[in-house]
């Protein structure tokens, strides 16, 4: 049977003059040409551009902008020197107010299109007071040659590092620590890992810092092998460690041929394997790979909101599913609630238990394992007032949805970093209705969106 010939009005290589109409959920500009959708990375609504078609598919094409004829009135000057070729941020050139409007619109569109739920007219967004210098964790790729490492994030749509001395959304102490490490790597000519040959030592850096405690934890991700003695001597020189607030230096070994950043083997080269972070009156003890919200001040606002939403629970049990290092569970326990946290990553559960102990909290327990394993058992044992779901980007499995529907908690609080999977899951939660929707700007200057939704059971 002959293939159906689709009428695509453009072909690769065509040069077009286009008006950027809106933004896609990816943060890319969207244009239309004779009814055909064209993604325009780097374009902002209101831009008039000349671009070259670099890709076509039956449903959409991609255009590379090589000239802006007219700039959007919402366009501002990005502070970062590598903004235009780094893939870390999408929106440094878009006025903050417009970034917030974009995020609300994406949530509304997802609810309407995917969940078939009419979104509220006004969704409240919790804006960030710190729109720069907020990110408490930097995961850097390292490439290049021995003695001349390139350290940074991958350039947009590639596997090439956009090398930069600073990143404006990271806490300044993380940039300072990275540059101190860079000069040691250069001085001692530490070999750099090459993906193709699978040889070389250093693959990446993970640096975590707390603004409230001043503590920094450093992880160096390596192929199998050891650092030379001279490098380790300089690395553990007390004056520099003190100045940068470093409390632990860890070598994480990842010898797999993979793009997953961390391996499973950690070796403490100096100091401790955790650093401490303070939110409100709580101290958290965090290890290198455990999940914690990247914007500490916004995390505090999110936790306070969840606390407000669970006030009516009284003595009843709350479940913090996908608990990470226990952030939400510990915050609620501090407010006097009875909480059970579930997390499959064992080091994160150890963090949570240690934090509970050091804060004197006995009204929370932490279970290591999947939500699929534990949630149904808990629901059989206890009446759960609220399930708090904060899953990874892929959302909830069918098993978890079924568990929730069978457990019939009074309310479900769903915290999500993916509006698409959030909307998909909401449609499957029959018998629950949305009471409140908030967008928390956890990731200023980027297209990433954090949403919190409170659902209550129909009676």
Image (cartoon, rainbow, N blue to C red):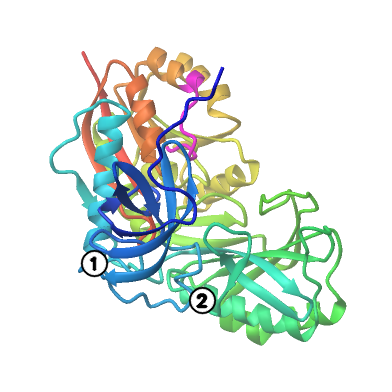
Q: How many marks?
A: 2
**Residue 451 included in the magenta stretch of the image:** no
Q: Whole-Å distance between the Cαs marked 1 and 2?
A: 34 Å
Lateral position of residue 407 relative to residue 243, left or right: left
The local crowd at label 1, few if under 14, some if 14 to 19, many if 20 or more residues have their Cα within 10 Å, is some
Tell me the SS state at disc 1. loop
Visible in this render: residue 310? no
- The percent coordinates of residue 388 (x first, y second) are 39, 33
Residue marked by disc 2: 173
- The percent coordinates of residue 102 (x first, y second) are 27, 52
Visible in this render: residue 346? yes
Q: Of all residues shown, which one is farthest toward the left?
A: 121
Is residue 122 shown above or below 267? above
What stretch of residues is rendered in magenta? 390-400
Tell me the SS state at disc 2. helix
Residue marked by disc 1: 72
Asked if the residue under mark 2 is in contact with the one under mark 1, i.e. CB atoms within 8 Å, the reply is no
**Which image quarter holds the N terminus?**
top right
Lateral position of residue 391 relative to residue 177, left or right: left
Majority SS type along the magenta span: loop
């Amino acid at each position: 049977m002959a293939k159906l010939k689709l009428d695509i009005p453009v072909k690769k290589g065509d040069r077009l003059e286009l008006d950027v109409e809106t933004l896609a959920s990816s943060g890319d500009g969207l244009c239309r040409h004779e009814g055909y959708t064209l993604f325009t990375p780097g374009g902002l609504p209101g831009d008039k551009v000349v671009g070259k078609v670099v890709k076509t598919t039956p449903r959409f094409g991609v255009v590379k902008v090589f000239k802006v004829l007219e700039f959007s009135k919402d366009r501002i000057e990005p502070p970062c020197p590598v903004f235009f070729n780094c893939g870390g941020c999408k929106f440094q050139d878009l006025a903050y107010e417009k970034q917030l409007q974009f995020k609300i619109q994406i949530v509304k569109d997802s609810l309407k299109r995917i969940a078939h739920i009419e979104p509220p007219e006004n969704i409240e967004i919790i804006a960030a007071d710190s729109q720069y210098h907020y990110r408490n964790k930097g995961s850097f790729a390292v490439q290049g040659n021995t003695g001349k490492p390139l350290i940074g994030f991958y350039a947009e749509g590639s596997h090439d590092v956009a090398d930069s001395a600073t990143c404006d959304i990271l806490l300044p102490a993380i940039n300072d620590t990275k540059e101190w490490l860079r000069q040691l790597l250069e001085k001692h000519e530490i070999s750099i890992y090459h993906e193709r040959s699978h040889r070389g030592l250093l693959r990446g850096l993970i640096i975590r810092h707390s603004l409230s405690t001043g503590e920094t934890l450093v992880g160096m991700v390596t192929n199998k092998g050891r650092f030379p003695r001279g490098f380790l001597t300089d690395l553990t020189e007390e004056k520099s460690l003190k100045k940068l607030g470093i409390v632990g230096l860890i070598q994480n070994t990842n010898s797999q041929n993979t793009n997953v950043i961390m391996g499973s083997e950690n070796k403490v080269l100096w100091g401790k394997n955790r650093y401490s972070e303070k939110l409100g009156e709580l101290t958290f003890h965090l290890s290198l790979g455990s999940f914690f919200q990247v914007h500490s001040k916004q995390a505090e606002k999110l936790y306070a909101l969840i606390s407000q939403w669970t006030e009516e629970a009284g003595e009843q049990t709350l479940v913090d599913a996908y608990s990470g290092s226990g952030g939400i569970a510990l915050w609620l326990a501090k407010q006097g609630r009875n909480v059970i946290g579930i997390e499959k990553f064992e080091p994160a559960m150890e963090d949570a238990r240690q934090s509970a102990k050091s804060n004197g909290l006995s009204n929370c327990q932490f279970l290591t394992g999947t939500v699929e394993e534990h949630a149904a058992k808990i629901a059989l044992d206890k009446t759960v007032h609220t399930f708090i779901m904060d899953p990874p980007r892929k959302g909830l499995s069918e098993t978890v949805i079924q568990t929730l529907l069978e457990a019939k908690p009074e309310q479900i609080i769903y915290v999500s970093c993916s509006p698409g999977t959030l909307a998909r899951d909401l449609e499957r939660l029959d018998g629950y209705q949305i009471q409140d929707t908030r967008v928390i700007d956890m990731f200023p200057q980027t297209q990433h969106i954090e949403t919190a939704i409170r659902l209550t059971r129909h009676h």
